[in-house]
């Protein structure tokens, strides 16, 4: 770039900064006035309503005053949001630029792209375009040459003549780069090389083409975004949330979206993303919240991580077999079909000994165009019975009214007889409804036993597991998989309330959910579309998790949008090379489907040390330059041991509960809790030896090593085992005593 061109960019940057400063000044002035107005309106309402409300006019007046107060408070809230947005914009007002020629008019245009739009107050000229706007998609999707962007149903054809990226730090323009590609590698490399803290960061300036496609896929439909560790799934999923809010700003607010994760560690990790994108934080839940809410306070349910640990501790094959049955698509479908076709008992309704309508006729109408779930069919049954009674009474109206008059001719008038007719009809309808409820009153515990036992008998299994499960329910103590099955039955029976105010849901690490769990979630959020994030290579067992991406269609249908992220960005080249090799299948190189961003740091280190603890402190001292370091171990017990040892040397936070929140620079964490997190440097302490006999050995090591951004250490007592000899080429192998 020529010097004169850079000076023009500096002048433009200064102009934008001046607009932001002016807007901030006005917003802050408005804030003072709004605060004063809120105080004034509250005071006035208090003074006017100190006494008790005397009549209806007082109620109307009070409601009017409350409306005024709430309106001013809402303005004040919006004002504060705008102030925070503009403060963020001061630091980085924009990150990209696109020069293009409109296809229809031939006019040359330039847009600057940032986290938020910026318009000059007086001229209404747009200085910065929101990254989510349709026109901004060109920055991510196209190189120089023919391009287009779509607004609603209209496709605008353009010719891109240039693209620029800006490096802006703390309100200072550092550099400007012309680029012909979708993403300038030097800038991306710089972003990826930065040190990480324990919060996921906004990446709008470095979104790649395939990531942009995932973000902007149809917000009304459910979407599966999948890829290897470090491909940006979580970041893209959360940026998609911001995009959903932008596209549906009139109908969807932050309180209408939900983020589901496996633990609260992850919740804290992603907590700043939406606020950093200028949106309010979304609701966050873990699946255990649904178990607690709908299965009753008196029910004790094993948590998810206890289930995993139980399966890993000697690998309980009997329990694993029953989990496979309970989580199977066949079991799920059987339960759905059972309640969709539930054989309701239908009362025989008579009037003066005459059958109003036969149960067979009602059943015929009920099964015509049958709704696909228990609750809908139950409601339909009540409607059909009510209609049958009303039809009978309408057909015999004159006859029934005559009977009433004949029996009460000296007491009732014809008008009063018609009123009695209506009362009798209502009583019959209510009586029929009461009978339907009484005949079809179901007990979820009994239903679960019966449905499960029937399924087992049909598949040639003994029903002893159904009996055990029923007794567990009576005792109020359930295994995690039993809690899921019980909740499924309650959902299918219509015994749980739904969440109709949630319109979009993100499910992180969705491969760790079973099919029944995903079905439950879909039923609990009937008005929601979903963004599912997953990587089947990060499943650490074949019992409780999704094994194929096709399985998602069983719950979300064939219309599910599937987007694969093909490139990994988190880890260095050497770490990714090792990770890819770990999950390769024979005759099917993973590099044929996926790639990684080339960023050299240092090869993974394999350190042999007879006393694992003795080399920890020297290693950690070498890693002092990093903002986040994790010592990852195989179990809670090992984590406690590391914590006890390090107490006299280093400040370190112990994470052994899914409820914990990461606060410290250095953490000690078991492998199964580290999923989804990232750290500048990772020490896998004894993880190879501890997992060598595990049937999912390589996937567990893959999970551990892909937590590292820059440096990775394996610390083991023994030399690299023969089963991993092929990986020596991807490591630097040393013995403790030398330099590590």
Image (cartoon, grey):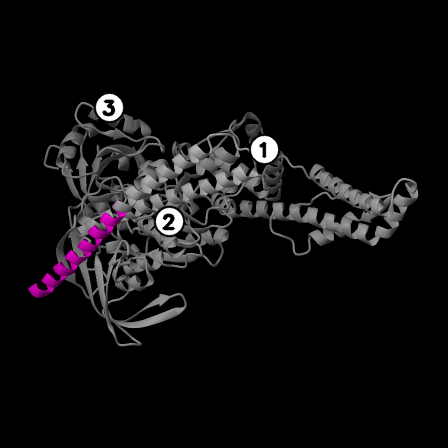
Q: Mark 2 or mark 3, which has the lower sequence index? A: 2
Residue labelled with disc 3: 644
Give yes or no for contact between labels 3 and 1 (Cβ–Cβ under 8 Å). Answer: no
x and y percent of residue 374 in the render?
62, 46
x and y percent of residue 254 in the render?
39, 46
Cα separation, mark 2 vs mark 3, equals 35 Å
- Would residue 698 be seen by someone viewing this image from the given angle? no
Residue labelled with disc 2: 534
x and y percent of residue 496 in the render?
55, 39
> Which residues are the magenta region?
1-28
Cα separation, mark 3 vs mark 1, equals 45 Å
- Prevailing SS of the magenta stretch: helix
- Number of residues whose C-alpha sits closer than 10 Å to that of mark 2, classed few (under 14), some (14–19) or many (20 or more): many
Of badges 3 and 1, the one in the foreground is 3
- Is 141 a magenta residue? no
Q: Mark 1 or mark 2, which has the lower sequence index? A: 1
Q: Mark 3 or mark 1, which has the lower sequence index? A: 1
Dot 1: element:
helix
Front residue of this view, candidates 688 and 711: 711
Res. 129 image quadrant? bottom left
Please tell me which residue is depicted at 22% across the width and 29% down the height of the picture. Answer: 652
């Amino acid at each position: 770039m020529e010097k004169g061109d850079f000076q023009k960019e500096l002048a433009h940057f200064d102009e934008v900064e001046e607009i932001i400063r002016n807007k901030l000044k006005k917003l802050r002035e408005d804030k003072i006035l709004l605060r004063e107005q809120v105080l004034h309106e509250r005071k006035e309402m208090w003074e006017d309503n100190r006494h008790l409300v005397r009549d209806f006019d007082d109620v109307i007046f009070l409601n009017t005053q409350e409306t005024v107060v709430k309106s001013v408070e809402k303005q004040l809230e919006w004002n504060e949001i705008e102030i925070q947005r503009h403060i963020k914009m001061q630091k980085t007002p924009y990150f990209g630029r696109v020069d293009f020629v409109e296809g229809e008019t031939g006019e040359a245009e330039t847009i600057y792209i940032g986290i938020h739009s910026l318009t000059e107050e007086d001229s209404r000229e747009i200085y910065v375009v929101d990254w989510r706007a349709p026109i901004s998609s060109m920055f991510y999707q196209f190189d120089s040459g023919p391009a287009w962007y779509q607004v609603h149903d209209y496709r605008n054809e353009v010719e891109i003549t240039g693209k620029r990226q800006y490096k802006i730090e703390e309100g200072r323009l550092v550099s400007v780069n012309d680029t012909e590609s979708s993403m300038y590698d030097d800038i991306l490399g710089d972003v990826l090389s930065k040190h990480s803290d324990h919060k996921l960061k906004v990446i709008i300036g470095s979104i790649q083409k395939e990531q942009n496609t995932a973000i902007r896929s149809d917000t009304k439909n459910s979407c599966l975004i999948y890829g290897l560790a470090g491909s940006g799934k979580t970041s893209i999923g959360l940026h998609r949330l911001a995009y959903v809010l932008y596209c549906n700003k009139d109908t969807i607010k932050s309180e209408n979206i939900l983020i589901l994760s496996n633990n609260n560690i992850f919740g804290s990790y992603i907590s700043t993303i939406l606020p950093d994108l200028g949106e309010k934080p979304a609701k966050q839940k873990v699946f255990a919240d649904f178990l607690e809410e709908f299965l009753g306070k008196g029910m004790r349910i094993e948590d998810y991580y206890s289930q995993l640990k139980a399966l890993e501790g000697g690998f309980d094959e009997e329990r694993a077999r029953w989990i496979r049955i309970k989580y199977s698509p066949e079991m799920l479908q059987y339960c759905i079909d059972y309640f969709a076709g539930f054989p309701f008992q239908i009362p025989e309704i008579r009037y003066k000994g005459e059958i109003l309508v036969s149960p067979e006729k009602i059943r015929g109408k009920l099964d015509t165009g049958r709704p696909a779930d228990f609750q809908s069919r139950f409601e339909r049954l009540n409607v059909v019975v009510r209609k049958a009674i009303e039809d009978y009474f309408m057909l015999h109206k004159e006859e029934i009214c005559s009977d009433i008059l004949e029996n009460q001719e000296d007491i009732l008038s014809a008008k009063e007889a018609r009123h009695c007719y209506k009362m009798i009809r209502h009583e019959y309808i209510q009586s029929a409804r009461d009978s339907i409820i009484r005949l079809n009153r179901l007990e979820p515990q009994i239903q679960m036993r019966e449905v499960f036992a029937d399924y087992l008998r049909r598949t040639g299994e003994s029903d002893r597991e159904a009996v055990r499960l029923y007794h567990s329910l009576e005792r109020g103590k359930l295994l995690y998989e039993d809690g899921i099955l019980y909740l499924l039955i309650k959902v299918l029976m219509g015994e749980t309330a739904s969440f109709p105010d949630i319109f979009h849901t993100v499910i992180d690490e969705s491969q760790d959910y079973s099919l029944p769990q995903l079905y439950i979630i879909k039923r609990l959020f009937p008005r929601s579309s979903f963004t599912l994030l997953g990587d089947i290579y990060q499943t650490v067992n074949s019992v409780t998790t999704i094994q194929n991406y096709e399985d998602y269609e069983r719950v979300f249908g064939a219309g599910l949008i599937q987007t694969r992220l093909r490139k990994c960005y988190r880890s260095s080249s050497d770490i990714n090379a090792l990770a890819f090799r770990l999950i390769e299948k024979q005759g099917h190189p993973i590099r044929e489907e996926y790639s990684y961003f080339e960023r050299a740091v240092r090869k993974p280190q394999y350190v042999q040390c007879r006393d694992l603890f003795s080399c920890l402190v020297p290693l950690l001292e070498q890693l002092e330059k990093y903002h986040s370091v994790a010592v990852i171990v195989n179990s809670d017990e090992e984590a406690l041991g590391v914590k006890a040892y390090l107490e006299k040397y280093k400040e370190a936070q112990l994470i052994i509960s899914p409820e914990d929140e990461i606060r410290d620079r250095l953490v000690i964490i078991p492998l199964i809790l580290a999923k989804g997190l990232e750290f500048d440097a990772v020490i896998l302490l004894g993880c190879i030896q501890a997992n060598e006999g595990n049937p999912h050995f390589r996937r567990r090591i893959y999970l551990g090593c892909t937590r590292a951004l820059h440096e990775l250490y394996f610390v083991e007592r023994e030399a690299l085992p023969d089963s991993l000899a092929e990986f020596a080429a991807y490591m630097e192998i040393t013995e403790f005593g030398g330099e590590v």
